[in-house]
């Protein structure tokens, strides 16, 4: 019988979505105050896979990923999401309560990528062995299949870029 041991620390990441990329410097500052220095920022990717966010956030949305130097314990991800929700609230348009930035925190470990998203507080987990998608809490994949699939491709590019960048700095 195996012995129970505490989980290994993981790499905190945040996927950002916005039509107002000029806001991200101050958003990233807020996140850094809580989670430490940012050690990687991806390029911007057009987020045109779905129009789900357009009524709230506008058109010409861009996706960007960041990661943090300081590692976290996986069970802290829920509190990270609560903080990111509070940061999102700092950037809403007062009269309409529409968000101008969407923050989806997650983590990367040696075995998987986990992303916590508010829509139905689902956990998206990608196994590094088969790159498979698992959804919990009864989320229906069908309406978002195309958007999720292409977002996973973007996340995969981010992971590969992060790994390459980390390897080059050794």
Image (cartoon, helix red, strand yellow):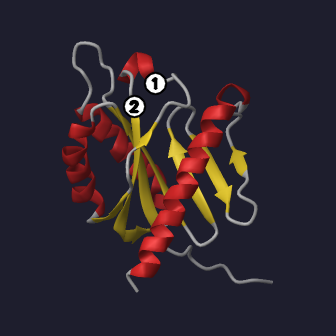
Residue 98 lies, in percent from the top left, at 33, 20
Residue 73 lies, in percent from the top left, at 47, 67
Identify the mark at residue 44; answer none if there is no mark.
none
Q: Which residue is mark 2?
A: 61
Q: Residues within 10 Å of mark 2 (few under 14, many from 20)?
A: many
Residue 44 lies, in percent from the top left, at 38, 46
Residue 125 lies, in percent from the top left, at 64, 53
Quarter of the image holding residue 6?
bottom right
Q: Are marks 2 and 1 in contact (CB under 8 Å)?
A: yes
Q: What residue appears at the point 38 percent right and 52 percent down from the top-left corner?
A: 43
- For the residues labelled 2 and 1, the Cα–Cα distance comes to 8 Å
Identify the mark at residue 53; answer none if there is no mark.
1
**Of the image marks 2 and 1, the number of the one nearer the N terminus:** 1
Residue furthest out toward the right: 1
Q: Is residue 122 left or right of residue 35?
A: right
Quarter of the image holding residue 3?
bottom right
Does residue 153 lie above or below 130 as drawn?
above
Foreground disc of the pair 2, 1: 2
**For numbered disc 1, what is the local secondary structure?**
loop
Does residue 125 lie above or below 72 as drawn?
above
Q: Residues within 10 Å of mark 1 (few under 14, many from 20)?
A: some
**For numbered disc 2, what is the local secondary structure?**
loop
């Amino acid at each position: 019988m195996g012995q129970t041991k505490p989980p290994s620390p993981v790499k905190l990441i945040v996927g950002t979505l916005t039509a107002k990329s000029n806001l991200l410097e101050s958003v990233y500052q807020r996140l850094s105050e809580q989670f430490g220095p940012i050690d990687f920022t991806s390029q911007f990717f057009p987020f045109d896979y779905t129009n789900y966010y357009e009524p709230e956030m506008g058109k010409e949305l861009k996706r960007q990923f960041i990661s943090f130097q300081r590692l976290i314990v996986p069970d802290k991800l829920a509190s990270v999401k609560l903080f990111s929700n509070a940061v999102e609230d700092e950037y809403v348009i007062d009269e309409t309560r529409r968000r101008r930035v969407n923050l989806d925190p997650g983590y990367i470990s040696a075995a998987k990528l986990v992303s916590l998203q508010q829509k139905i507080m689902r956990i998206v987990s990608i196994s590094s062995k088969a790159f498979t998608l698992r959804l919990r809490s009864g989320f229906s994949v069908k309406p978002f299949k195309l958007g999720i699939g292409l977002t996973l491709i973007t996340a995969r590019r981010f992971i590969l870029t992060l790994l390459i960048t980390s390897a080059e700095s050794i």
